[in-house]
Amino acid sequence: MFCVQCEHTIQTPQGAGCSFARGMCGKTAEVSDLQDMLVHLLQAVSLYAQAARKVGIIDTEVDAYVPQAFFATLTNVNFDPARIIAFTERAEAFRNSLKSRYEAACKAQGIAPEKLPAAANYKVPTEKAVMLSDSLQFALNRQKKEVGEDVIGLRLLSLYGLKGAAAYMEHARVLGQTDLEVAGKFHDFMAYLATDPTDMGELFQCAMDIGHLNFRIMQMLDKGETDTYGHPEPTKVNMRPITGKAILVSGHDYHDLELILKQTEGKGINVFTHGEMLPAHAYPAFKKYKHLVGNYGTAWQNQQREFKAFPGAVLMTSNCIINPEVGQYQGRIFTRSIVGWPGVTHIEGDDMSALIDAALAMPGFDKDEAPVYTTTGFARNALMAAAPAVIEQVKAGNIKHFFLIGGCDGDKKERAYYTDLAKAVPQDSIILTLACGKFRFNELEFGDINGIPRFLDVGQCNDAYSAIQLAIALADAFGCGVNDLPLSLVLSWFEQKAIVILLTLLALGIKDIRVGPTAPGFLTPNLIGVLNQQFGLKLISTVEQDLNDMLKAA
């Protein structure tokens, strides 16, 4: 195996990447190699989807499947080799169907079919052992000696960014949001990367174009969420247990949460959110469910301890699952959609009865704990409504600076930086946050500035669009560019969704972003230098130094 897509990845003086029997995330070499083959087949599908579009063939089922199956290869999503093989075989079937239809259309129109790259026509072996042997030719660091580590790094920057965009496309699709132009561009990027490009200028532009595409995808996702569930409203959420039978919902998928809430009404089961599901409490559509009682636990990396202690059933709706055998709760955790773990029950369709029965069989919480609250729901509409008051306080000199401190959480001790930074931010500053990195400091009390909360939880990583919209609104109000605002972005990355959000911000021209806790392993020193030169991208250092530099630059 060779995998370097997440912040967990092994980094040594000889190079970065997990290349052993098991990666740091728990993914086996078998699963990793099968995922590389799946990526190759999905690129083959995109090559034919791209060609087919030129002769008038658009298959919306294919358009949906490619990003959906690509999502399965993200960090901490699907560890089940049988399901990865099934995704690959279905991808091959789609490729073969598109190829036949494309060649028939060319014949009917009297034109010669394009000569596509060899990647378009790979035949999947029927035996797993042969698949694993073949998968070596699809390793993501292939050609490293021939093309150099900077080219490989740029290929992976684009590929991993595109993985993040695929995840957001699937989140949007579940909520009824699709777009033929977006799907076509997605196939274009997949097809381009299938050719093993070597031009660094083209590869860098590809990464920026993926960032632009993701901005459009996040607009679609925002529309899907707000059209379906209403606009989030600032809402206090209890972070402690409530007496009774219990279900815990983790991941990102509000559609699954709604199914559970509908099917548990009147059954005496309390429903709790976990991790990135916390912002669900702010949506009007979920407020009518009185048995949605609060949030339990923190970020994804703590789930083995938190899920073990949770006296009910657990549903993982999307990333980020980790080994449930460690906490011995594999018999009461269920997966949905693209998520998978060997031996864990996977729920197909909309019937949640297996999950509900498991919750009823568990004891649940035997007492209430004293409530502790956090406030979430400062998404696009709420931020826009508050913008005039914020602008007034800025003009009056009461608000001097804005800090966006957000992104993925993880278990490295260096991540204490983000807690320390939030605590050190001056009292005349506003802190915005999003994604699971907020659990580092969202139970702290930050107070307010003349009625405006100093701590604004924008929502999931899916809600980065809201934070961008606020920055644009403030820039418009002050007649300046976003980079001229007293705004500092300090991001924490872990996996591919964070990579594509970073690409989105860079593509929009936002500069002087700080990223940590460490540099992505696939970015060479040369590439980090280019990003610093063009965008002012920096790695975090110390809280004192970074805070001093950010305030001095304002």
Image (spheres, grey):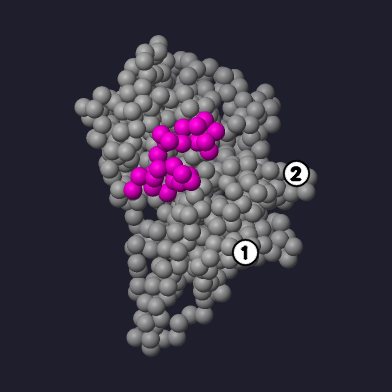
Residue identified by numbered label 1: 133
Question: What segment is highlighted magenta in the picture?
Answer: 323-348
- What secondary structure is found at the residue carrying circle 2? strand
Between residues 175 and 11, which one lies in front from this camera angle? 11
The image shows residue 191, relative to residue 470, as above or below, that is: below
The image shows residue 356, relative to residue 146, as above or below, that is: above
**In the shown orientation, is residue 439 left or right of residue 524?**
left
The residue positioned 65% from the left and 28% from the top of the image is 413
Magenta stretch: includes residue 416: no
Question: What's the residue type where badge 2 is placed?
Answer: Thr
Binning the other alpha carbons within 10 Å of mark 2 as few (below 14), some (14 to 19) or many (20 upward) gives few
The residue positioned 47% from the left and 51% from the top of the image is 72
Question: What's the residue type where badge 1 is placed?
Answer: Ser
Q: Are marks 2 and 1 in contact (CB under 8 Å)?
A: no
Residue most toward the top?
Answer: 370
**Res 93 quadrant in image:** bottom left
- What secondary structure is found at the residue carrying circle 1? helix
Main SS type for the magenta part? Answer: loop
Residue most toward the left?
Answer: 266
**In the shown orientation, is residue 236 left or right of residue 493?**
left
Between residues 99 and 475, which one lies in front from this camera angle? 99
N-terminal of the pair, mark 2 or mark 1, is 2
Q: Is any atom of residue 444 visible in this view?
A: yes
